[in-house]
Amino acid sequence: MVSFNKVIIAGNLTRDPELRFTGSGIPVCDFGIAVNRVRSKSEEVDFFDVTAWRELGETIANYKKKGDPILVEGKLQYRTWEAQDGSKRSKVDVVADNVQFLGGRGDGEGGAPSGGGGGARKGGGQRQGGKRDDVDINEEDFDDIPF
């Protein structure tokens, strides 16, 4: 039996990413993406819920906000649960394996990532914590880098 579960979507965040931690301290970030679906003369929008774990989730929470363009590569995950009223519920989510930040710095227009950065992969986040911080970069600090 052949199994393949891969999805790539690109769109804009519908809300600020929400970073939370599991009981054992593992970071998990939830956010939504709106993806335009163009038909012959009309345009519709599809909405997807996305979950990113660990460093990938922290990176998204630290650097992205509502309205920012993003590309997500991941897999679909089907979940079922019982609601408080006893009814059975189900949902299909996207679980992110890696993301690409689209658009330039301060540019909500989409396009190529800025400055060669902007991408994040599972296990490759650079920052800790759940707060969004501005970073000042002084190019003189890079004079001693050997490349």
Image: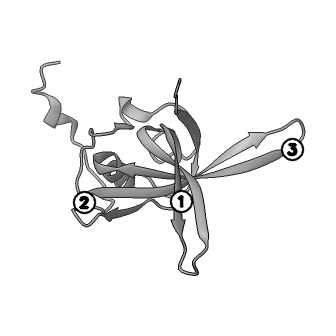
Q: Secondary structure at mark 2?
A: loop
Tell me if mark 3 has few (under 14), some (14-19) or many (20+) residues whose alpha carbon lies within 10 angstroms of its own: few
The amino acid marked with disc number 3 is: Ser
Q: Tell me the number on the disc at residue 129.
A: 2
Label 2, label 1: how far apart the Cα atoms are:
30 Å
Dot 3: what SS?
Answer: loop
Q: Looking at this rendering, what residue extends furthest in the bottom direction?
A: 85
Q: Going 39% across and 56% down the picture, which residue do you hit?
A: 29
From the top left corner, tell me how far across and down residue 88 is, in percent: 59, 68
User: Upstream in the sequence, badge 3 or badge 2?
Assistant: 3
Q: How many marks?
A: 3
- Nearest the camera: 24 or 79? 79
Residue displayed at 33% across by 39% down: 122
Say which of 58 and 115 sits in front.
58
- Tag in front: 2 or 1: 1
Please report whichever mark, 2 or 1, sits nearer to the chain's N-terminal start.
1
Residue 91 rendering spot, x and y as whole percentages? 58, 57
Disc 3 to disc 2, C-alpha distance: 42 Å
Q: Which residue is mark 1?
A: 80
The image shows residue 22 at horizontal and vertical percentages of 29, 63
Provide residue 127's location: percent of width, then percent of height.
24, 50
The Cα–Cα distance between marks 1 and 3, rounded to whole angstroms, is: 34 Å
